[in-house]
Image (spheres, rainbow, N blue to C red):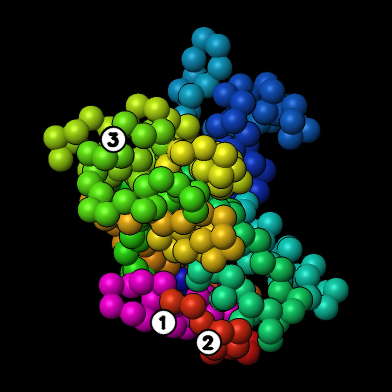
Amino acid sequence: MSSLNSKWFIRARLKMRQLLLLVGLDEERNIHKTAEALGMTQPAASKLLKELEDMLGVELFERLPRGMRPTWYGEIMIRHARMVIANLGQAHEEISALQIGMTGQVNIGVIMSPATTLIPHAIAQVKATHPHLRIGVQMDTSDILQPRLQQGKLDILVARLFEDNDNEGLSFEPLAEERVCVAARRDHPLMTRKDLQLADVASAAWVLPPAGSVLRHRFDLSFRQNGLEPPKNLVETFAMPVTTQVLAQSDTLAVLPVAVANYLASFGMIAIVPLELPCHMDEFGIITRRDHLLSPGAQILLEALRATAAAVYASPGGTPQEIPPGGAKTYAA
């Protein structure tokens, strides 16, 4: 028997409609509504699900008085069904792109700090040699981005990998630590102060990331470890336009990644307060799925990220460095 014929899904003649049914049941939790959405009868949908459960030898959904709920086995199949559907959708997009003379689509997720340093340089390098490669960029926190990668909605992440997350099947290439600093408007009274201490800013107004984010947790912890209560006068947001405008119009302070603060300061939008903040972030890096073959376009972007990172984070401690246009190696297909 060939290796292909030995696959259980070949022997079971697994149908695409069964994968769509799994995802639909997970979203609707109702077989009648799911069958209606897929354009089939309820008995036909029930038969498809029963055939799959019989082949696997497990129950994928609990039948409840009012609806259905995935079992642990069902959760596994649903997760992989989403990945298969996403991969097939991506395959169609790549074929369509090639048909009209493009070189495909690649989607990358990134946290804030490398979004202002690494990603723009890497994209510029790729676009210099592959102008028709479509690059989608999503910026968010690591915990939001990682499930999108695992579901096949993203090809590459530049983010953090946390030990308490489901990291099975993921590869991590460390790049740099993310240092943070205190930012304010350029003529803020604290800019002329010397020997600033954490106690001097504990009662100030702050713009901070929302509670639950890693940076917010580390920020609050830095005050508690120094015997201080974390600031209470807060505006909570990740929105940079809001942050910069609040700083410009008041004596409010903000905690920002150093790379982001340097970028904003270069345009005169903020200044970095002379206070060493005892707040340390974990290392971030390039995250990909080990079991997923990257498209040619994604592979080109991945290699550009690696080369650009070597230039951007070349200094001791991984401090972001400015590199001139064309300063990093470009890649051909």
Vertical comparison of 199 with 296: above or below: above
Which of labels 1 and 3 is toward the front? 3
Q: Nearer the viewer, residue 18 or 241?
A: 241
CA distance for labels 2 and 3: 42 Å
CB under 8 Å between discs 2 and 1 = yes
Residue at the image point whose x is 25% and y is 49% from the top:
196
- Residue under pointer 1: 310
* Callout 3: SS: loop
Q: Residues within 10 Å of mark 3 (few under 14, many from 20)?
A: some
- State how far apart marks 1 and 3 are (Cα): 38 Å
Q: Earlier in the sequence, mark 2 or mark 3?
A: 3
Residue at 28% over, 78% down: 316
Residue range highlighted in magenta: 298-320
Q: Position of residue 89 (x, y in %)?
A: 68, 57
Badge 1 or badge 3: first in the primary sequence: 3
Q: Amino acid at mark 1?
A: Ala
Query: Where does label 3 land, which residue?
Result: 202
Q: Residue furthest right?
A: 100
Q: Is residue 221 left or right of residue 248?
A: left
Up/down of 27 relative to 296, above or below:
above
Q: Amino acid at mark 2?
A: Ala
* Residue 62, percent from left and from top: 45, 23
Query: In the image shown, does 160 or 196 lie closer to the viewer?
Result: 196
At label 2, counting other C-alpha atoms closer than 10 Å, the crowd grade (few under 14, some 14-19, many 20 or more) is: many
Measured as percent of width and height from the top left, residue 35 is found at: 70, 28
Indicate the secondary structure of the residue bearing disc 1. helix
Residue at position x 47%, y 32% in the image: 235
| Residue under numbered circle 2 | 328
In magenta segment, residue 98: no
